[in-house]
Image (spheres, coloured by chain):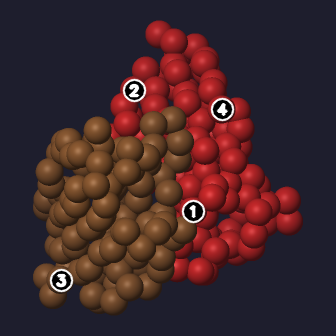
């Protein structure tokens, strides 16, 4: 079963604009991770945020975590064509499983 | 350094057959986990192994099994294949388990006919 759900399911924006996608989950977590997947191949780790952190940055990526609302958001600033991919959140609830969400399909229009 | 490698890349099997998928983790990584990804969905957790012991198991039938070898490589075995087992099977490695970032291999595309 999917622990998390990403919103929106699909997003299309112009190159240079910012993209925001959200992840909601159901149970308490140790950490939440964001991954990118191109063309149905292997996933690439983007950012890991722990339950005691509220915000993390990595280059053009900004992740926030609100444990009271059981939600996280991923912001990609100044989008590029190469950012076109599917984005997944994954939660570690301390039960020796990593549970992925349903994904957001991001398309950057040149 | 080499990333996570998986073999084979593609595989076609018939219903009822057995399949073995292989994964080699990044050097120094002691944890390997397996995921099944059906087209259009997120990866579903199957197993996690750490130091050759099973640490976590997802909601998959007993037809699915795995093991980790002394060199930390891993095999995923699926018996009595069903059409619904057709998917991309992903392997990931990490230093110490699921509380650290996972490094994924390119996956094995399994088609069951």
Q: Position of residue B54 (x, y in %)?
A: 38, 85
Q: CA distance from mark 2 to mark 4?
A: 19 Å
Q: Are marks 2 and 4 on the same chain?
A: yes
Query: What's the chain of the residue with tag 1?
Result: A
Label 2 packing within 10 angstroms: few (<14), some (14-19), many (20+) = few
For residue B50, side relative to residue A92 (left or right): left
Residue occupied by mark 4: A9
For residue A15, side relative to residue A65 (left or right): left
Which residue occupies 61% across, 44% down?
A102
Q: Are marks 2 and 4 in contact (CB under 8 Å)?
A: no
SS for dot 2 = helix
Is A88 or B113 nearer to us in this picture? B113
Residue occupied by mark 1: A99
Q: CA distance from mark 2 to mark 1?
A: 26 Å
Residue B100 visible from this viewpoint: no
Residue occupied by mark 2: A82
Which residue occupies 22% across, 60% down?
B18
Q: Quadrant of residue A2?
A: bottom right
Label 3 packing within 10 angstroms: few (<14), some (14-19), many (20+) = few
Label 1 packing within 10 angstroms: few (<14), some (14-19), many (20+) = many
Q: Quadrant of residue B1?
A: bottom left
Q: CA distance from mark 1 to mark 4?
A: 17 Å
* Identity of the residue furthest to the right in this view: A68
Q: Are marks 1 and 4 on the same chain?
A: yes
């Amino acid at each position: 079963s999917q622990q998390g759900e990403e919103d929106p399911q699909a997003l299309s924006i112009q190159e240079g604009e910012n993209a925001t996608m959200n992840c909601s989950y159901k149970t308490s977590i140790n950490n939440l991770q964001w991954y990118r997947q191109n063309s149905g191949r292997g996933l690439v780790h983007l950012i890991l945020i722990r339950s005691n952190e509220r915000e993390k940055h990595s280059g053009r990526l900004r992740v926030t975590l609100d444990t009271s609302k059981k939600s996280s958001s991923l912001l990609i600033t100044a989008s590029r064509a190469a950012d076109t991919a599917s984005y997944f959140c994954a939660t570690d609830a301390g039960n020796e499983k990593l549970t992925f969400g349903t994904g957001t399909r991001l398309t950057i229009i040149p | 350094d080499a990333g996570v490698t998986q073999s084979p890349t593609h595989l076609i099997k018939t219903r009822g057959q057995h399949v073995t998928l292989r994964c080699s983790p990044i050097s120094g990584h002691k944890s390997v986990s397996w995921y099944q990804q059906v087209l259009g969905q997120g990866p579903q957790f199957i197993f996690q192994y750490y130091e050759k012991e099973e640490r976590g198991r997802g909601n998959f039938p007993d037809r699915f099994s795995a093991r980790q070898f002394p060199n930390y490589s891993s095999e995923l075995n699926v018996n009595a294949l069903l059409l619904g087992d057709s998917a991309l099977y992903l392997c990931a490695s990490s230093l110490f388990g699921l509380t650290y970032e996972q490094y994924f291999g390119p996956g094995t595309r399994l088609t069951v006919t």
